[in-house]
């Protein structure tokens, strides 16, 4: 065998280092050596979705100001053929979460999501924003009314604002899944499941039966579906 080109080896190592850095800092990488020869971008939404305010340094967070530019780059990159979204999130900033969900939903390439540990609160619209969604058997989805931290002034305008935010979430989720608006609202305001709060927790196949998620499955099923969607031209 001949000797490898030193410049090629150097460039290869630099590219691998950049991918490792992206994965460590942003939870993102491109799967460009797949068995089906498709370039798939991997986006991890882990921990809490961070909005305009920074979370503490000890909190695991997905920063929307990192994710949005990357999604725009993906849309403009003709080499990326699909998006796989891995979710294990407790929720977070409503506006930031909806912004990411709207971006994913508007991509021209096929997108598949996979709920792993859980996709709670604003994680629900993120999970359904893809073209097809999976949840592992032990994965959970928590649907509950919008909560605000800090002091809230109890005026009619405040409650109307809360209703407006909830309507945005309900409308998005019902438009991107098989569950109807009113059924979703009933789950959100359920008083029988959570003793100290309103809402509903759905586990694995319950999320599928409710119409929120398309199918129970894991990474194998999610990648298989994404490859088939790319082969079919979306």
Image (cartoon, rainbow, N blue to C red):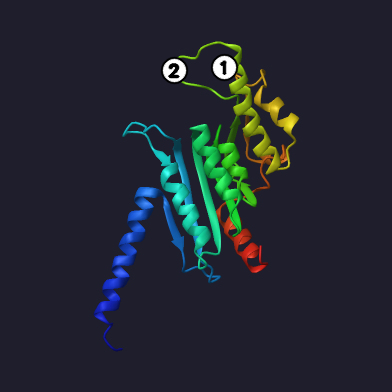
Task: Name the disc covering residue 180, or none.
Answer: none
Q: Nearer the viewer, residue 183 or 52?
A: 52
Q: Is residue 93 left or right of residue 6?
A: right
Task: Name the disc covering residue 150, or none.
Answer: 2
**Image location (x, y in percent) of residue 28:** 43, 53
Tell me: residue 208, above or below residue 192: below
Q: Is residue 55 left or right of residue 144?
A: left
Residue at image location 48% in from the left, 32% down from the top: 93
Assign a secondary structure to mark 2.
Answer: loop
Spatial CA distance of label 1 from label 2 is 14 Å
Residue at image location 49% in from the left, 64% down from the top: 77
Q: How many marks?
A: 2
**Image location (x, y in percent) of residue 142:** 59, 31
Residue 138 visible? The answer is: no
Residue that sits furthest to the top in the current view: 154
N-terminal-most mark, 1 or 2: 2
Residue at image location 34% in from the left, 57% down from the top: 20
Residue 5 visible? The answer is: yes
Assign a secondary structure to mark 1.
Answer: helix
**Image location (x, y in percent) of residue 229:** 65, 62
Q: Residues within 10 Å of mark 2 (few under 14, many from 20)?
A: few
Q: Nearer the viewer, mark 1 or mark 2?
A: 1
Q: Is residue 95 left or right of residue 171?
A: left
Residue that sits furthest to the front in the current view: 157
**Image location (x, y in percent) of residue 220:** 57, 57
Q: Quadrant of residue 57?
A: top left
Badge 1 is on which residue? 158
The N terminus, quarter of image: bottom left
Tell me: residue 157, above or below residue 11: above
Q: Residues within 10 Å of mark 1 (few under 14, many from 20)?
A: few
Residue that sits furthest to the bottom in the current view: 2
């Amino acid at each position: 065998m001949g000797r490898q080109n030193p410049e090629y080896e150097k460039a290869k190592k630099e590219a691998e280092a950049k991918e490792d850095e992206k994965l460590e800092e942003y939870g993102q990488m491109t799967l460009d050596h797949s068995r089906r020869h498709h370039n798939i971008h991997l986006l991890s939404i882990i921990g809490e979705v961070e909005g305009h305010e920074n979370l503490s340094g000890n909190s695991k967070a997905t920063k929307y100001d990192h994710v949005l530019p990357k999604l725009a780059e993906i849309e403009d990159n003709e080499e990326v053929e699909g998006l796989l979204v891995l979710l294990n999130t407790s929720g977070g900033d409503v506006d930031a979460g909806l912004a990411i969900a709207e971006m994913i939903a508007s991509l021209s390439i096929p997108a598949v999501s996979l709920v792993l540990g859980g996709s709670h609160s604003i994680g629900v619209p993120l999970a359904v924003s893809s073209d097809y969604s999976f949840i592992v058997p032990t994965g959970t989805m928590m649907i509950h009314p919008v909560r605000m931290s800090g002091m809230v002034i109890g005026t009619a305008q405040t409650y109307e604002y809360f209703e407006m935010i909830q309507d945005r979430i309900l409308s998005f989720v019902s438009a991107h899944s098989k569950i109807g608006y009113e059924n979703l609202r009933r789950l959100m305001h359920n008083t029988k499941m959570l003793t100290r709060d309103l809402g509903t927790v759905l586990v694995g196949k319950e999320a599928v039966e409710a119409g929120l998620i398309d199918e129970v499955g894991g990474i194998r099923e999610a990648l298989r579906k994404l490859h088939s969607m790319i082969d079919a031209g979306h």
